[in-house]
Amino acid sequence: MTRWFEDITIDEVFPLGDHTFTESEIIRFARLYDPQYFHIDPEAARHSHFGGLVASGWHTVSVGHRKMVDALDAEAGRLKAEGDEPGVSGPSPGVNSMEFKVPVRPGDTVTYELVVTDKRPSNSLPGWGLLFNRLTAVNQRGDLVYCAEIVGFSKLRDYRMPWRLKLLLALTRLPIIGKRLRRST
């Protein structure tokens, strides 16, 4: 998230945009990353349990991830243009759940959105908070095609490291003491 942890509002919806999946794009992606017959062979896919060509779930995820990164970049640009300093987003410690609900077919236009469902300061990374997010993708018929619960780090703007932690960090940099401290953990 390109807002500071303190500025993030729970349940705020971030529209990420939409994408229309074409047959050629579905096949191209699948040939590179998920070459199963129902993703790469329209004729054979007609006889599959899907009843036709479908996009790889990883294709759906990749498009959504790109939309999310682009939206975060745009948000940072908007904040800079308003004279504000964007927050600092960190890595993701993981995905808690991921579901592919309805197949994405050629011609489907999928709309993505992100919602921060919860947040808390990190217990393991001082100065950072954890954001719990729901990423959803809905096709033009209103069917949920994909949803995921993902976690990401966001930097705290006003974090001041406690003196005890500063001292411990300084001690770990001393050759003899640092070696003993690292062995004890």
Image: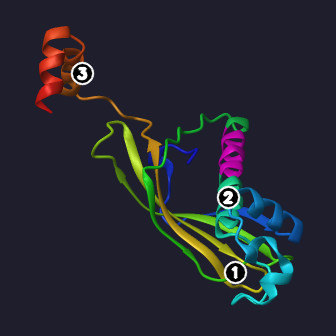
Between circles 3 and 1, the one closer to the viewer is 1
CB atoms at circles 2 and 3 under 8 Å apart? no
Where residue 100 sits: x, y (%)?
59, 76
Mark 1 and mark 2 lie on one chain; the one further toward the N terminus is 2
- On residue 169, the disc is 3
Q: How many marks?
A: 3
Q: Which residues are magenta?
A: 69-79
The residue indicated by pointer 2 is 62
Q: How is the image coloured?
A: rainbow
Name the amino acid type tagged 1: Pro
Name the amino acid type tagged 2: Ser
Image-based side of 45 in relation to 83, left or right: right
| Alpha carbon separation for disc pair 3 and 1 | 50 Å
Where residue 145 sits: x, y (%)?
66, 78
| Alpha carbon separation for disc pair 2 and 3 | 39 Å
The residue indicated by pointer 1 is 103
